[in-house]
Image: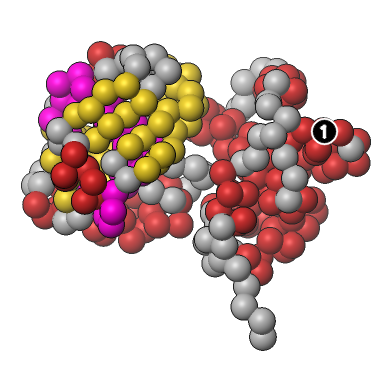
Amino acid sequence: MRIAIMGSGGMGGFYGGMLSRSGEDVYFIARGEHLEAIRSNGLSVKTSSVGEFNVIVNATDDPSDIGPVDLIMVCVKAYQTESVAQFIKSLVRPETVVLSVQNGLENEEKLAQAIGREHVIGCTEYVSSKIESPGVIREIFNRETLIGELDGGTSPRVDEIAKTFEKADLPVTVPEDIRASIWGKFLAISVMASVCCVTRVPSGIIFAHPETESLLWGALDEGVALAGAAGVTLPEGFVENIHETASKLPVNFRASMYHDLEAGKRIELEDLVGVLVRLGEKYNVPTPLNFAMYAALKPYANGKPESP
């Protein structure tokens, strides 16, 4: 399969490296020192499942160098989706599939509007990886990737991608309703990201204070109500499962949005928090806790705020 990885950072580098290792024809779109390191030394990936490996790969900062592909994996920050969708149009042919490996609820719709809904299938994942140094990716965990047609279920193209991923030691599940899976993952990361960023503390401290923990679960309850209003049926026991998963987090766990906030970078505020406020207004569902956290973080949306 001919595959383009748009955004070859922690997530894109991991997926692309694993797929390249298994024999797929992978092209990386990257930039800066990371791109130069990949070009000079190949891509090195450190994993918990197959050990460490290095692959010599094709890497560029210009999609027009690649030409049409079978699969495009979009692995950039959610706020970059619309601009990236225009950037990768040269990679699309009639049968090309586009897969959003991103945080947020609206990425598939943004890609569909720019490239065509017929090209987009749904995706969410329980994978964590990062750039350890230019040209080097470290996987933290690789639990599963979920994919499916936006209208539900599977199809020959979904099955083909699933087989390709499984061959690359990337566990895959094809749920009956990928939208519910996307919402479930989104709600879990959204509320933790919001509370981590507002409080500036890790999960262990959040759960050590009943009032702060109540903020987290109250924000989750608002999100669950929104999912119902949007016609999404979350799995039975969803809230209980989130509580159980949260109880097993390392005490020093911080959401990825927190790390961007601390570094003074742009954060995925609109895509992880603002979207809940907007949907609350659309469906007339109260979201006071999510609104309060959104408002508190708004000055940091584009990085460290400057003095007026």
Would you say residue 154 is visible in this rendering? Answer: no
On the image, numbered disc 1 is attached to which residue?
207
The residue under the point 33% across, 14% down is 50
The residue positioned 28% from the left and 54% from the top of the image is 33
As helix, strand or loop, the secondary structure at mark 1 comes to helix
Q: Nearer the viewer, residue 272 or 15?
A: 15
Give the residue at x 39% y 14%: 49
Q: Position of residue 143 (x, y in %)?
A: 47, 19
How dense is the environment of label 1, judged by Cα within 10 Å: few (below 14), some, or many (20 and up)?
Answer: some
Please give left or right for residue 94 compared with residue 202 in the image.
left
Vertical order, 89 against 184 (above or below): below
In magenta stretch: residue 275: no
Q: Is residue 17 magenta?
A: yes
Residue segment shown in magenta: 7-34
Residue extending farthest to the right is: 210
Please determine whether, in this image, residue 132 is positioned above or below residue 284.
above
Three-letter residue code for mark 1 = Phe
